[in-house]
Amino acid sequence: MSCITAENLYKSYGNVKALDGISLNVNYGKVFGFLGPNGAGKTTAIKIFTTLIQPTSGKVSILGHDLLKQPNMIKQRIGVVQQKPSFESNLTVEGSLNLYGKLWNISNGERNKRVQDLLKMFAIEDIRNVKNEELSIGQRRRVQVAREFMHDMDLLFLDEPTVGLDPSARRTLLDYIKERVKEGLTVFFTTHIMEEAEYLCDEIAIINKGKIIAMDTPSGLKQKFGGVKIVEIKLKEPFNGIENVLNSLGISGNVELQDSTSIKISAHNAEQILISVIESLNKNNAQVASISVNPPSLEEIFLAMVDGANESSS
Amino acid sequence: MNPVLRLVNRNLTATIDKPFLIWQIIFPLVYIFVAGYAYTAVISSVSLGEVNIDYPAFIASGMIGFNVMNSSLIAGTMIWTDRRNGMFEQILVGPFTRSQYIASNILTITMIAFISAGMIFAVSVPTVFVNAPISLPTLPYVILSIILGSIFFGSLAIIASIRLRSSERFQITINTMFLFFAFVSTTFYPAEGAPEALATAFYVNPLTYLVDIMRFGLFGTFSSFIVWEAVILATASGVMFLVATYMLAKLNA
């Protein structure tokens, strides 16, 4: 049985389709990444899965419970870090963690232990006595994320949790989530940052204009949609005839020139193109400093897919 | 602990502005001891059925009702603050229903109203109530009036906080409504002797019913109309609570 199952999920606001028939399965103990540009429908999906709003149509099961029939059973077992900041402005950092533990009915001893652990884990010990309203955006975000781990849960929804965090805090959070996933937690994670998705997620769905346009493991996505490879050639010295050389080869791919010392080519037959480019450069006495051939990053796949979907729909 | 009580604990710990709460308790004392005694020269005593009471005792009993209404403003402020700070959604994705959330708000302001009423009563007993005929058997009606008043005005404040997105509009609307409720009522003066149109307007005002039931509870001044006032206030409170709950249920988080 899946942890999250959505079948033919639609959500409309008037004439606007926020979700246009999405279906997905998230297995227990996995991190599921939900990627998409702004307004793609990520937050709408999370709001439906966390029972805040109801779908226009479609069927959703969370942790074995029907979303519409048993929302309270679901809410007892999930954690949610919303994209929007949420904080108790009058309370200190420590006070808000403590109060959140009380809201979740955590016993006194356990609550105090968790507060101390989380203050340390998320490096917010030095601001423990500062009121939330006096914190910076990044600090407030760290407290918001830390607070959610005050209670036990089987499934955690993270809606762009690293927005506003510095790289160190971001890595701390991602590593902490990885640890919790090893203990059995399932995570539904939305982000704009592809490195995070690649680092954390077992499976990824790319959503655009309310539709899922691809869904696979990160490596599966690269294999399926990553036939294009990227060739980068750097020259020792500027070579003014570089543009003519490349034009004469009639390359079938995307060519980018950065000043006259760097060439970046994205193409399916990258190896063949590389050989012919090197030969031409040698003939013209242009000395090569370095060569690299790389598969595309998840970000490049994401951009290509979203752009492709936008072009085909327009 | 029960989910509603956990939310009440949160409201009292995190949401309520402490200086506002202190002012809520001090404010009526100023009215009772300044206006109460100052107006004694104009209104020496007020007749409630067969009983005459001093004006300071009359206004003190009215101020308990007035403070129930004023405390209910907090219910709207709590929701407004929670929505602004993202805690409304955070609570609703937690182990709480919308009904529990609204019930916790009403219970919070009811508790504040009781504390406030208790303090006014405690201060009034050795002072302005010294010569007043306090009626012990009817005191439960004081409790009834506080509960019904909290539900009615709390629900009203919640409805206003849902409808009005800006803090300024919420404050202006609530203050305007409460100004009407306070001065077009029997809180500060009796309906008898007022111009007929104004006296009639007193009785389209739920605060009048709340204050009349409160005075009956305190002084035992029974009239058959009190029963009707209790029925009307109970019905109006029930309707307002249902409307507030419905609107909160429909509110997009």
Image (cartoon, rainbow, N blue to C red):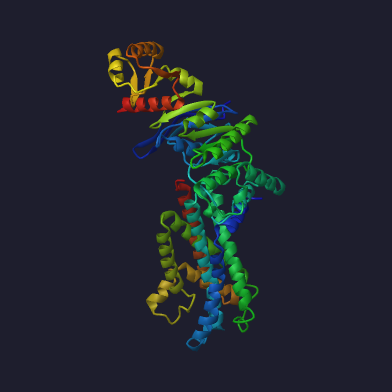
- Could you say which quadrant of the image residue A251 lies in? top left
**Quadrant location, the C terminus of chain A:** top left
Find residue A303 and report its image quarter. top left
From this viewpoint, is residue B169 visible? yes
Residue B81 to residue A312: above or below: below
From the viewer's perspective, is residue A263 above or below residue B93? above
Q: Quadrant of the N terminus of chain A?
A: top right
Residue found 54% across the figure and 74% down from its top: B28
Q: Residue at x 40, y 17 (%)?
A: A288
Name the foreground residue: B40 vs B149.
B40
Q: Is residue A66 above or below residue B191?
A: above
Count of all numbered marks drawn on residues in the image: 0
- Give the farthest residue toward the right: A109
Give the image location of residue A227, x and y in percent. Answer: 42, 16
Relative to B20, A242 lies left or right: left
Residue B129: x percent and y percent? 61, 80
Q: Position of residue A191 (x, y in %)?
A: 48, 34
The residue most toward the bottom is: B41
Q: Position of residue A267 (x, y in %)?
A: 37, 17
> Can residue A69 be seen at all in this image of the molecule?
no
Foreground pick, B159 / A162:
A162
